[in-house]
Image (cartoon, rainbow, N blue to C red):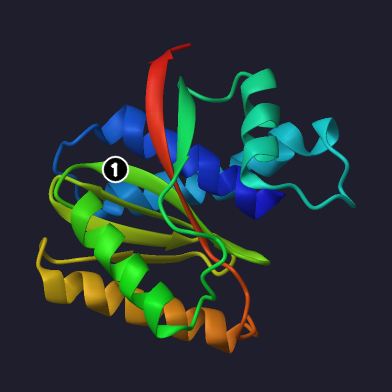
Amino acid sequence: MPARSCSVKIADRVIYEFDGNVFDIASLADMVEEVIWVLPERINGKRDMAKFYDVSEAYSILSMETVLNSRYDFFEELPFADCIYSFESRKSLHGRLCVLGKNDFAAIFSSEPYILTIGCTGERAFLIDTHTGSLLVEKDNAHSMRKSLCIWLWERLQSAGVKQGTGQSLSLDTKTRSV
C-alpha cells in the first residue's frame, strides 16, 4: 500500500496546493519526496502490512487518518478490461490524457501491481512513479508530449514485468469539499 497511499496523497497535494497554478519542477519534486519519506511512517501502523490495498482502500485509510486536505470522488476514465498493451488500450489512455489535459487534473493510473500519479497543472502534464522516485514533467501541453508520456509509461511497465493481458485503470480524483 505505500505506493498506493503515496499516489493518493500526492494527487491530493497537487489538487490542493497547486490548484492550476504554474509550478516549478523543483517544488513538485520536493513535495513528492516529502510524501514518500513521511507518509509511510505515519500510516504503516494503521494498516495490515501483508495486505494488498486498492486505491479506494488506501483513500479510506488516509481519510480516517485525516492526512488528506480534501475529500475526493474517483471516476474511472478507462475500461479496466482493456489490456495494457493492446492497440485499443494505448489509444484509450492517450486519448483520455489529451482530453483531461485540457484542464488541470490529478489521477491514479494502475496496472497491477504498479500504480502511478498522472496529472496536469498549469498546462504542464506530469507522471510520478513512487516505486522508483521518477518524476516526468512535460515541457508544454502538446499532443506529442502526451504521447511521449504514454510511451515512457508503457516502457516502464514492460521493464517492470507487467504482462500482456493485465488490465489498466485511470481513476480521476475530483475534489468534493474541504475537510
* Residue closer to the observer: 30 or 118: 118
* Residue closer to the observer: 73 or 15: 73
Task: Say if residue 159 shows up in the picture.
Answer: yes
Q: Position of residue 46 (x, y in %)?
A: 82, 30
Q: Residue at x 14, y 45 (%)?
A: 122
Q: Residue at x 28, y 53 (%)?
A: 26
* For residue 103, above or below residue 131: above
Q: Which amino acid is tagged 1?
A: Phe
Residue 16 position by quadrant: top left
Q: Position of residue 146 (x, y in %)?
A: 22, 69
* For residue 153, above or below residue 161: above
Q: Is residue 97 found left or right of 42 in the rendered image?
A: left
Q: Residue at x 63, y 54 (%)?
A: 3
Task: Say if residue 65 shows up in the picture.
Answer: no
Q: Which residue is mark 1?
A: 105
Residue 56 position by quadrant: top right
Q: Is residue 85 found left or right of 42 in the rendered image?
A: left
Q: Secondary structure at mark 1?
A: strand
Q: Residue at x 13, y 50 (%)?
A: 123
Q: Is residue 41 found left or right of 33 in the rendered image?
A: right
